Image (tube, grey):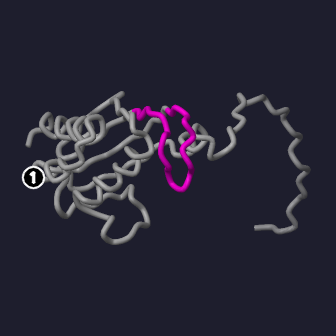
Amino acid sequence: MSQQENLLLCLNFAQKMINERDLSLAPRFIAAGSVHHEFGDVPSDFQSGPRAMAQFLNLYLRAFPDLRMTFEDALADRDRVVTRWRLEGTQNGPLMGFAPSGRRVSIEGIRIDRIEDGRIAESWMQMDTLGLLEQIGALPKLRREPLREVPAEKPPATRESRFVA
């Protein structure tokens, strides 16, 4: 496949499976032996392949029934596609043991997909999980203040070395 076709594959994956919620299309986008590094420490039947991806996405689609993904950037190079995206939705279902909050969230993330034979064969994803947990009320809001100039300290007094080279 061309780089453009690889890029379209990844964009269509998100459109069909997330925005249109058609998880039955997983085998169309995800290779049977695919590896998904973003899944972390999960049971073996949840680590790879189209079924695992559909289960992973379903966790978020149940928690955020109105979930939408939009792309901020997308790049393709040989067999890799990199996307920078935004997820937005309202938490009306449980997520990671946290009860529905009814709160609207907006988080960003980056995903790298390796394409093989017209399907996603390997993926890596990083998203703003801390921001997500703050927005649903699972964590207190962090106080993020601008950096202040810290007065320079006097360097500690040095002793002369007693060792001679």
Task: Please state which of residues 164 and 48 is positioned toward the viewer in this rendering.
Answer: 48
Residue ID at (14%, 34%) = 4
Which image quarter holds the C terminus? bottom right
x, y percent for residue 116: 14, 53
Point out the residue furthest to the bottom here. 44
User: Please, what is the dominant secondary structure of the magenta stretch?
Assistant: loop
Identify the element where label 1 is drawn: loop
Task: Please state which of residues 43 and 76 is positioned toward the viewer in this rendering.
Answer: 43
In the image, which residues are magenta?
86-105
User: Is 160 positioned to the left or the right of 53 in the image?
Assistant: right
Residue ID at (41%, 35%) = 87
Which image quarter holds the N terminus? top left
Residue ID at (85%, 62%) = 161
Residues packed near mark 1 inside 10 Å, few (<14), some (14 to 19) or many (20 plus):
few
Residue ID at (29%, 60%) = 52
x, y percent for residue 129: 52, 46
Amino acid type of disc 1? Asp
Q: Does 96 appear in magenta?
A: yes
Instruction: Return the residue at label 1.
Output: 117
